[in-house]
Amino acid sequence: MAALGWLTPRRRSATARSVLAGEAAAEAARKSSQELAELAELAQAKADGTAPEPEFPVVGDDLAAAFFDLDNTVMQGAALFHFGRGLYKRQFFQRRELARFAWQQAWFRLAGVEDPEHMQDARDSALSIVKGHRVSELMSIGEEIYDEYMADRIWPGTRALAQAHLDAGQKVWLVTAAPVETATIIARRLGLTGALGTVAESVDGVYTGRLVGEPLHGPAKAEAVRALAAAEGLDLTRCAAYSDSHNDIPMLSLVGHPYAINPDAKLRKHAREREWRLRDYRTGRKAAKVGIPAAAGVGALAGGTAAAVALHRRRR
């Protein structure tokens, strides 16, 4: 009996432990099953492109900032061309020069890409036009031109992206080949931190008709962002950059959060291969209704058919 009495409690204790072990195993199995189901759902959502993105931009991350290209990213068309239209209205140059601006703008809006030859021609034209004028005069006129030709051409979607960074407490810069004075006006009007742009040489406050260095384009943008990040103490892996052009791949590749906005074909392909985020705020019908008539209207003012010629060449 003594032996039996000694065994009975042991048997009961083992049974209790077995029950506990079984319950623990069942709970673990239930949890693991839920986790596996959640992982499967997440994998499927990722495959479908519907997976929830982590919070971005991160609120309060003062080591992060955002860098936005301007032409066709923040603004429809090219800022330099809109600026040229405003200068023509103020009789800074003749009709034949306006026709050239109109043709370049029509091509840019239709093709959706930056043609180096057109952009260089536009810059040369702008430099010759402003030569001998005071910087303060062009800044004052630039404010008026923004209201006349640029304010209604800001992409609301891109503007919202920039505002999200501002709301998160981050600095936001424009980075553009457009003149720094024009870029600064646009940045200030949009409530952004500031702008990096092409610098035209001036002596005693008067434009000389030459550039300081070269246009802020392609690799030069990446170098400007790198230099500004170093000066501001930013961590580029936590920063974001936004552009429409494959020319800005060096700048986009520099940051941890690159976005392709209204991308040209080369950038779209590059972004998809690297799983960069894409946003496109354009539609074909909107381009037809807004882009072509806008440029054609300028050509009509010039007494020419430059925009129609550009459209004809495009269709060929």
Image: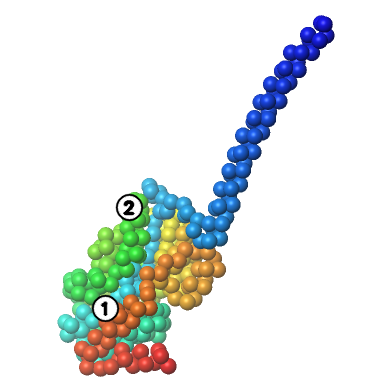
User: Which residue is disc 1 drawn over?
Assistant: 82
Image vertical order of residue 127 relative to residue 7, above or below:
below
Given residues 297 and 196, the one toward you in this image is: 297
Per the image, the residue denoted by label 2 is: 167
Q: Verify CB contact (< 8 Å) between mark 2 and mark 1.
A: no
Tell me the quadrant of the picture where the N terminus can be found. Answer: top right
Residue 55, position in %: x, y?
43, 51
Can residue 128 be seen here? The reply is: no
Answer left or right for 60 relative to 146: right
State how far apart marks 2 and 1 are (Cα): 29 Å
Amino acid under disc 2? Asp
Kind of residue sitting beneath label 1:
His
Q: For marks 2 and 1, give the one nearer the viewer.
A: 2
Residue at 48% over, 72% down = 268
Q: For this view, does 100 lie left or right of residue 280?
A: left
Q: Earlier in the sequence, mark 2 or mark 1?
A: 1
Q: Tell how many labels.
A: 2
**Residue 3 in view in this figure:** yes
